[in-house]
Image: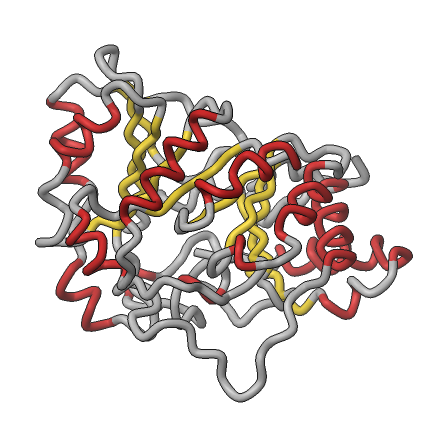
Amino acid sequence: MALQFEDNFQRKFYYLRLSLTDVCNFKCTYCLPDGYQAGKERPCFLSLPEIRRVVQAFALCGTTKVRLTGGEPSLRRDFTEIIRQVAATPGIEKVAMTTNGFRMEKSVAQWQQAGLTNINVSLDSLDPRMFHQITGENKFDQVMRGIERALEVGFTQVKVNAVLLKGQNDHQLPAFLEWIKHRPVQLRFIELMQTGAMDHYFDRYHSSGQVLCRALQEQGWQRKVRASNDGPAKVFWHPDYQGEIGLIMPYEDGFCETCNRLRVSATGKLHLCLFGESGVDLRDLLQQDNQQAALMARIQSGLGQKASGHFLHQGDTGATPHLASIGG
């Protein structure tokens, strides 16, 4: 390993979130309520060789986990080949994806064969009508079949993401707990995060994850130890449940102290924080194999600008217009 990516606060980065596209076919109220807007010129997303080069650079500098995100990553026609290429990169131990689940039933076995090791599925409600209301798509049954299919083909655990929304799904904890009692599902409640385009929505629907945290602890749920390349969730387990609960609470004090992940957008920009600056352009160094040393140096130089934390408490959401823009 040539060097270890590290910032000025001695945080090391084992985890890359790589966006493959900002296109999504769902219209979730907290992200793209009006659907994907392409603009005048459709962006040119990273090619397979560019993806190979950026993943190799991160792997040489200590990254062991890559998460393929979007938008909806499975909208890429070459998605399976991207999985295969990332999984073949020396040093990469986990290849994960985050998906809305609409293609899982059909394709998850193929993805696993290509090298996918971990899968996260968005499922904001167990009520089909509320699911439709939140996502803008009447695909609840299709997504649920996809989750079951992932377990059938051998994924030992599926992570399910639910954005916590006041008055819409924040009362559904008992139903979710019943659902995971006999399933190897880690259900992750994610606090709604403010973005530039969603100020009023945030004011109306934000609910603190601390309420759920207290409820879980009162019911005997216990914290798990966090691995070096795990995401930001606080994970709880209970002896009576096969499934687990994760809580992602970005407004909690100290949330950024254990940050271990960096983001690269679908157009090749390094983002030091989900709620940060406009990004460090890497694409000019992704055109040839002989630019790897310069690429690693630029990433490490960029880390010198990484702040100790986000500024969400001050209402500063940075340059992020919506979560699909750099992979959430």
Residue under the point 67% across and 69% down: 281
Q: Is residue 177 left or right of residue 80?
A: left
Q: Is residue 218 left or right of residue 181?
A: left
Residue 100, x across and y down, in percent: 40, 51
Seen from this angle, which residue lies furthest front? Answer: 106
**Image quadrant containing the N terminus:** top right
Closest to the observer, 137 or 283: 137
Residue 119, x across and y down, in percent: 47, 37
Q: Is residue 302 above or below residue 10?
A: below
Query: Which scheme is used to colour this image of the protein?
Result: secondary structure
Seen from this angle, which residue lies furthest bottom? Answer: 40
Residue 127, x across and y down, in percent: 16, 45
Q: Quadrant of residue 34?
A: bottom left
Residue under the point 47% across and 61% down: 71
Residue under the point 27% across and 48% down: 140
Q: Is residue 6 left or right of residue 310?
A: right
Closest to the observer, 281 or 138: 138
Q: Is residue 196 above or below residue 214?
A: below
Residue under the point 68% across and 64% down: 46
Let me know if residue 305 appears in the view.
no
Seen from this angle, which residue lies furthest top? Answer: 239
Let me know if residue 275 appears in the view.
yes
Residue 97, x across and y down, in percent: 51, 44
> How many marks on residues?
0
Q: Is residue 202 above or below residue 250?
A: below
**Image quadrant containing the C terminus:** bottom left
